[in-house]
Amino acid sequence: MLKWGLRILGVFVLLNVLGAIGAFVVIDRSIVEMFGGRTPVIALEPSHETPERYVLANVRVLEPGSERFSAPMDVVIEGGVIADMGPDMAQRANAPVMNGEGRYLMPGLTDSHVHLWNSQNDLALYLAYGVTQIREMHGLSHHLQWRDEIAEGDLLGPDLYVVAAQIATYDFAEGLWQSWTSKRNVARTPEAADQMVRDLAAEGYDAVKASSYLSLSGYQAVSAASEDVGIPLVGHIPVAARLDDLWVSNQSEVAHVEELIKGLDRDFGGYGVSTAGEYLDYVMTHRDAVARHMIDNEIVLASTLALVSSFAQQKTDTEDALETAPVNLVNPGVAEGRAMGWLPDVNIYSVPQQYRNEGWRDRYQTYWTTYARAQQLMFEAVLEAGVPMVAGTDANVPVMAPGYSLHQELAALVQAGMTPAQALESATGTPGRFMDWNTGRVLPGFRANLLLLNANPLEDIRNISRIEAVVMHGEVHARDELDALLDAVVAANDSARQTPLDPAWRQPVTR
């Protein structure tokens, strides 16, 4: 009898274990879909139809420093690299000639802050908008695979610089949830943080990222380990840290201008609606010192101005904010899911209904317009001081569509005070140097990741959208091919919308 009882108990336990495994599998699949995994992947195979050696003739070349375009000249490309350039090269190159007809040739753009998640189709969007390099800021193993396949010529897309998913500190239960659902690298102790940096470096990531939720001791451990193994430390300034902790760290890049004003806010003691004016005065008083520290410690700053400028409207008038956003370009799993949701019922920035009491709109507008104003004040200081800046968008975070958003960011940088030349440099030469790529210049020996424009972006930064062709690893992609890529992505997104997400991942956001 006891034997049969044990057998029945064993069967019961086994069924429960299998049921739990099945539930985990279903939830894990839903998470993958929420980050874009249910959308059909379009064909992303390089055509290899461009000759190995050819001449782009009669093009005006953006000169180093991005201050001006040259007189028309010829550019020889061979094996995916700029081989030579100058007047009358076409007559001597002994290679096929593509006539640029006086158009404007410049380095392909770099978006230094993107999130691909599971949306491989985004690779096509970047190319279609002239972005030939991206820095993935939540890197996972499949991003490393995409990076290598693109480098080897087996996958069509921009070159990838893959920053490992952020290192964060949570308690045990929250850590399990965050590592499973958000794929963050959770380190609960300094020792674990140290080992995590070493493991990520060994796995082949290009950099490691500090999270806002990393403990101070964990941040210090990550900083020391990154210096020891020689891998860059980039990202956020942890909430547990102060700006003084940044200055003594090994962090070589800060992922948003807003990180600096968050640091000042912590030093200020936390501003609110009633102290908004005092906080802006505090920023004015301290911003020059912050800029000098950035220069002294050789820290690069990513921008994401357009995103932060959208916060006030997204908070209070989400539907209005979405009216001008190209939602059709965004993977439906991303736009519709709770994790990075764009749509009104899941928008991660929209004020939840329970907080919409009397006077809520005015309070939130005051707070977030103050936040945007503080960012502008800090931006002016770092620009004046000469802090090296790289254009980044936080693409796939609402309302920043992959590829398209970098054009918005360049316009925002000019509106904030950059010259068009400075804005172009932040998306070409500066990130090329920071990420140690031979990109960002149209010079012999540099990678042939290029952009051919029909109008001069130095005269109007919006001309960056007047794309005639994109050259990726020497392969020429003409306007009709780029349009076909855009159409294919939109069609795939439309197809994915026919299969709704699990309702559990479309609940209204509560924070």
Image (cartoon, rainbow, N blue to C red):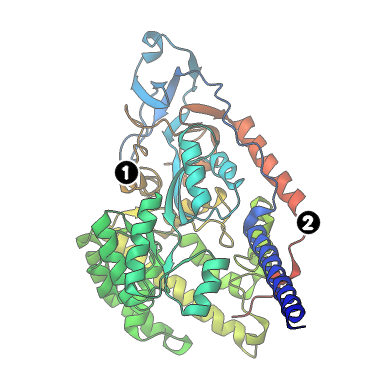
Q: Mark 2 packing: few (<14 Cα in 10 Å), some, or many (20+)?
A: few
Quarter of image, res 505? bottom right
Q: Quadrant of residue 247?
A: bottom left
Q: Looking at the image, can residue 329 be seen?
A: yes
**Which percent across, then down, holds residue 198?**
33, 58
Above or below, 107 relative to 91 = below
Query: Where does label 1 land, which residue?
Result: 436
Query: Could you tell me which residue is drawn at 24 percent across and 58 percent down?
Result: 228
Q: In which quadrant is the C terminus drawn?
A: bottom right
> Is residue 386 shown to the viewer in this render?
no
What residue is drawn where x is 46% and y is 24%? 102
Name of the residue lying farthest toward the left: 296
The mark that comes first in sequence, 1 or 2, is: 1
Q: Report the residue that reaches farthest toward the right.
A: 498
- Give percent across and percent down for residue 4: 77, 78
Residue 499 is marked as: 2
352 left or right of 217 in image: right
Query: Counting other residues with Cα less than 10 Å from the Cα at mark 1, is it few (<14), some (14-19), or many (20 or more)?
Result: few
Residue 147 point in image, percent of width and height: 47, 43
Looking at the image, which is closer to me, 158 or 36?
36
Mark 1 or mark 2, whichever is nearer to me: 2
Dot 1 amino acid type: Asp
Q: Is residue 492 left or right of residue 134?
A: right
Residue drawn at (46%, 60%) of the image: 165
User: Is residue 251 left or right of 394 when viewed as pictured?
Assistant: left
Q: Is residue 188 above or below residue 475?
A: below
The residue drawn where x is 61% and y is 82% is 361
Provide residue 182's location: percent of width, then percent of height. Answer: 55, 66
Vertical relation: 275 (above or below) 243: below
Q: Nearer the viewer, residue 235 or 407?
A: 235
